Amino acid sequence: MSTYLLVHGAWHSGQAWERLVPLLTAAGHRVLTPSLTGHGDKAHLLGPEVGLDTHVDDVVGLITDEGLTEVVLVGHSYGGLVISSVADRVPDRIAQLVYLDAMVPEDGETAADILPVTQVLIDLAAQSDTPWRIPPLPELPPPGGLFGVTDPTDIAWLRTTLSDQSALTLRQPVRLGNPAAHAIPRTHIHCVGSEPEGFERRPVPATQPNGTPAQVWELESGHDCMITVPGELAELLLKLG
């Protein structure tokens, strides 16, 4: 049995994984899907002081409080920043890092450094009455959809789970300095086939930090693949368990 800890992306919550969880648990694994501070059941805690460090503390606290070890730590989108920082803090508890269509930071980088369009959202918020508060992205024309979700029923459900994001989460830099984290194997899962026009993904280096060849898998899906193709995603994740 493996323990999968699934970390959602910006604006989302732990609910995003609802379709994936039963597929992993049916295979005998333990699955945790926390909502980060300011999202889901913690939406009432959203405030200007909530930053990337807050979310890292959320996940590290869960790991230590539950006594988790050999964790398969999955980060979706912005969650890539979170899992990188968590691995730096508690590398001895992490068996695998999975970057699911995710940001993969270097030390000192912010979300805006990795995905420059993020700075546009920060700047727009700065001109509003609540400059620290960034609303979810709007739905795009097909095939973009709402975070890559195009089915009208799914879009309606997804809207009910989204909440605003604190700007500090996107402005706060990642701090990575623990060489022990380099030994953790990494897998990158890229959602392909319906990327927004002009989207450029940062290339994955050919060699992982632990010296082994990079492991990069592709999944035909929009960005929120856990909603659109949970079965296919589960098949990939179960290869790691």
Image: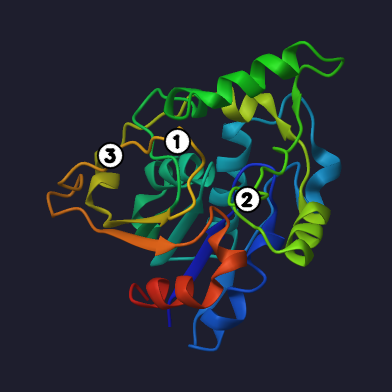
The residue that disc 1 covers is 199
Residue 95 in view, yes or no: no
Q: Judging from the image, what secondary structure is the residue with disc 3 in?
A: loop
**Cα separation between marks 1 and 2:** 15 Å
Q: Judging from the image, what secondary structure is the residue with disc 1 in?
A: loop
Q: Position of residue 208 (x, y in %)?
A: 20, 48
Amino acid identity at mark 1 = Phe
Q: Position of residue 116 (x, y in %)?
A: 49, 23
**Cα separation between marks 2 and 3:** 26 Å
Q: Judging from the image, what secondary structure is the residue with disc 2 in?
A: loop
Q: Foreground mark, 1 or 2?
A: 2
Q: Tag on residue 142? A: 2
Image-based side of 210 in relation to 67, left or right: left
Mark 1–mark 2 contact, CB under 8 Å? no
From what the image shows, is residue 176 above or below residue 214? above
From what the image shows, is residue 126 above or below residue 231? above
Q: Earlier in the sequence, mark 2 or mark 3?
A: 2
Residue at image point 37% right, 38% down: 201
From what the image shows, is residue 199 above or below residue 25? above
Q: Earlier in the sequence, mark 1 or mark 2?
A: 2
Amino acid identity at mark 3 = Pro
Q: Position of residue 167 (x, y in %)?
A: 67, 25
The residue that disc 3 covers is 203
Residue at image point 55% right, 41% down: 56
Neighbourhood count class around disc 3 (C-alpha, 10 Å): few under 14, some 14–19, many 20 upward = few
